[in-house]
């Protein structure tokens, strides 16, 4: 997905469907786009005076830095930072004089379900958040933008469906991620996590992670588990299997190729780790996803709900 995204042009798309009356209050997308604002662009939006009303905006910084003022509080918006606001609302977002450029992706929604979602998130989690690009909420936004760009969303029903999908990803992210992110990982454990996620496809071991963080293997293992719930190697295997699931669903690569791609040279061992983690074999998961009913989640007896996205 990211390789396609890197090639996309910077465009903004608006939707103006003549909705059937019965669809007037359902969630829908009003606009979506990628913009790159530079110092000469004089970019400034005041949510209290915009022509649109009852619009719900999510905007995410891809590079550069923007700024948002909510009430009397000013927040910077560097890379990997997002905000959720409502129009109308007492806030302004803009390219500040301290920044030369601001590239971002955004989506604006309408409908009572969108209002409920935004009110819930703003009340419980705030308005501004740090979210890494790899998180599913951002990947879903990017996928929606790409589909719009490729003329895949051309009727009110499909657009509404994607609006509800995005709302679901919002609820899931802010329920399962934000609370954990509020308690920041210690710098050495964050360093270990980033090192694992960057190098998972190599023959990584505990000695490599220990050396990178400067912690002894014992101290690393104890501290890593206390903050993440996993030992470093269990986290590595979990992350490898998550990447393997994506490859199984979205490529035609063989099990052997996927095994190598995620850093497990022996495909037989890969299958054992995969089954131990998910409760099913790689081939079973691929067949399930390719069957008549394409599932986003799989519920198993021993492993609960497995996210197949």
Image (tube, helix red, strand yellow):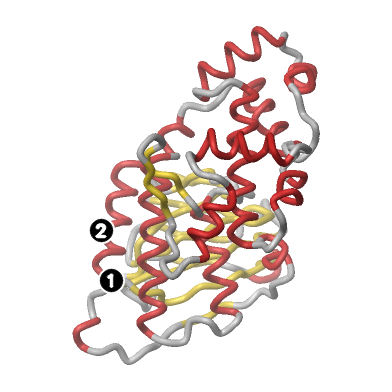
Q: Report the residue marked by disc 2.
A: 116
Disc on the earlier residue, 2 or 1: 1
State the SS at label 1.
loop
Q: Residue shown at 58%/59% (left/top)?
A: 249
213 relative to 90, above or below: above
Front-most of residues 175 and 297: 297
Residue 50 lies, in percent from the top left, at 39, 73
Residue 174, horizontal then vertical, whole percent: 39, 45
The secondary element bearing badge 2 is classed as: helix
- Residue 100 x/y as whole percent: 72, 58
Q: Nearer the viewer, residue 202 or 228?
A: 202
Q: Most extreme residue toward the bottom, as rendered?
A: 18
What is the number of the mark on residue 68?
Answer: none
- The crowd level at tag 1 (other Cα within 10 Å; few <14, some 14-19, many 20+) is many
Q: Which mark is residue 111?
A: 1
Q: Residue at x 52, y 27 (%)?
A: 184
Between the residue at mark 2 and the residue at mark 1, the CA separation in whole angstroms equals: 9 Å
Residue 238: which quarter of the image? top right
């Amino acid at each position: 997905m990211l390789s396609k995204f890197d090639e996309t042009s910077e465009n903004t798309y608006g939707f103006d469907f003549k909705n059937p009356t019965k669809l007037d209050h359902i969630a829908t997308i009003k606009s979506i786009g990628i913009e790159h604002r530079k110092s000469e662009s004089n970019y400034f939006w005041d949510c209290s005076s915009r022509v649109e009303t009852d619009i719900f905006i999510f905007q995410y910084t891809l590079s550069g830095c923007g700024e948002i003022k909510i009430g009397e509080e000013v927040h910077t918006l560097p890379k990997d930072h997002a905000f959720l606001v409502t129009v109308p609302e007492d806030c302004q977002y803009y390219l500040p004089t301290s920044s030369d450029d601001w590239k971002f992706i955004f989506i604006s929604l309408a409908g009572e379900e969108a209002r409920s979602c935004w009110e819930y998130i703003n009340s419980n989690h705030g308005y501004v958040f740090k979210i890494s690009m790899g998180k599913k909420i951002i990947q879903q936004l990017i996928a929606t933008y790409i589909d719009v760009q490729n003329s895949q969303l051309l009727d009110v029903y499909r657009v509404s469906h994607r609006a509800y999908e995005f709302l679901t990803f919002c609820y899931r992210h802010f329920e399962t991620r934000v609370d954990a992110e509020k308690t920041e990982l210690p710098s050495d454990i964050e360093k270990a996590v980033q090192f694992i996620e960057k190098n998972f496809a190599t023959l990584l071991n505990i000695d490599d992670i220990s050396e990178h963080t400067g912690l002894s293997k014992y101290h690393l293992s104890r501290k890593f588990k206390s903050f993440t719930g996993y030992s470093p190697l269990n986290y590595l295997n979990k992350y490898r299997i998550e990447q393997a699931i994506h490859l199984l669903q979205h490529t035609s690569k063989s099990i052997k190729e996927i095994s190598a791609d995620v850093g497990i040279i022996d495909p037989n061992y890969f299958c054992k780790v995969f089954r131990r983690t998910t409760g099913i074999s790689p081939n079973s998961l691929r067949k399930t996803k390719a069957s008549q009913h394409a599932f986003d989640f799989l519920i198993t007896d021993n492993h609960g709900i497995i996210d197949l996205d």
